[in-house]
Amino acid sequence: MDEEKLGEMLDNLFLLYQLFQKNVLKYKTSNGRIKMSFAHYLTLIILKERGELSISEIGTLIGMKKQNMTYLTNKLVEDGLIQRLHDMSDRRVIKIALTGKGDEYLDKWRKSKIEETKEDFSFYNDKDMNEICRSIENIKQVFLRIDNGRKNF
């Protein structure tokens, strides 16, 4: 593997991440939204897609240590967006689930993000937007293959 090409790819990924955070994940508290980090939103999204999960499972999915996840989930519980569920067969097992308020909040956040993104991308034509969508999908597929490859070892 060409190390120079790999270094260039990493530089571009870091820049892409920074630009994505700056331009898409703008933290605003408008529309009654609670100011939260991307990790908070990602936790809500994962719970909506996958249902009940343990703190460790969520942490593994977003790449965060358990002690940091505990702090993060405490904030979401405090805001009423998630709840802790005790396993009746084993009280030591605690699952985390999205509440109705959390589901509603996430839907409002998503709609708001779509509106903001519409403004940001309004100057692109349909051809450009299709190319952007294909490029993002390709990048996602590459990282899914990497992730799946790691699980096989």
Image (cartoon, rainbow, N blue to C red):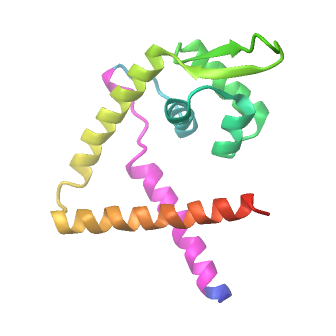
Residue 2, how many percent across, how many down?
Answer: 65, 89
Q: Which is more toward the observer, 37 or 48? A: 48
Instruction: Judge whether 23 appears above or below 74 on screen.
Output: below
- Quarter of the image containing the N terminus? bottom right
Q: Which is more toward the observer, 90 or 73? A: 90
In the image, farthest residue toward the front: 89
- Magenta segment, which residues? 5-31
Instruction: Judge whether 28 appears above or below 101 on screen.
Output: below
Tell me the residue at 30%/33% (across/down): 112
Q: Quadrant of residue 134?
A: bottom left
Tell me the residue at 33%/39% (across/down): 113
Principal secondary structure, stretch drawn in magenta: helix
Instruction: Judge whether 99 appears above or below 110 on screen.
Output: above
Tell me the residue at 38%/68% (across/down): 135
Residue 150, how many percent across, how many down?
Answer: 73, 62
- Quarter of the image containing the C terminus? bottom right
Tell me the residue at 73%/26% (across/down): 70
Is 19 within the magenta? yes
Residue 62 as seen in the image, left or right of residue 141: right
Is 16 within the magenta? yes
Residue 89, how many percent across, how many down?
Answer: 80, 13
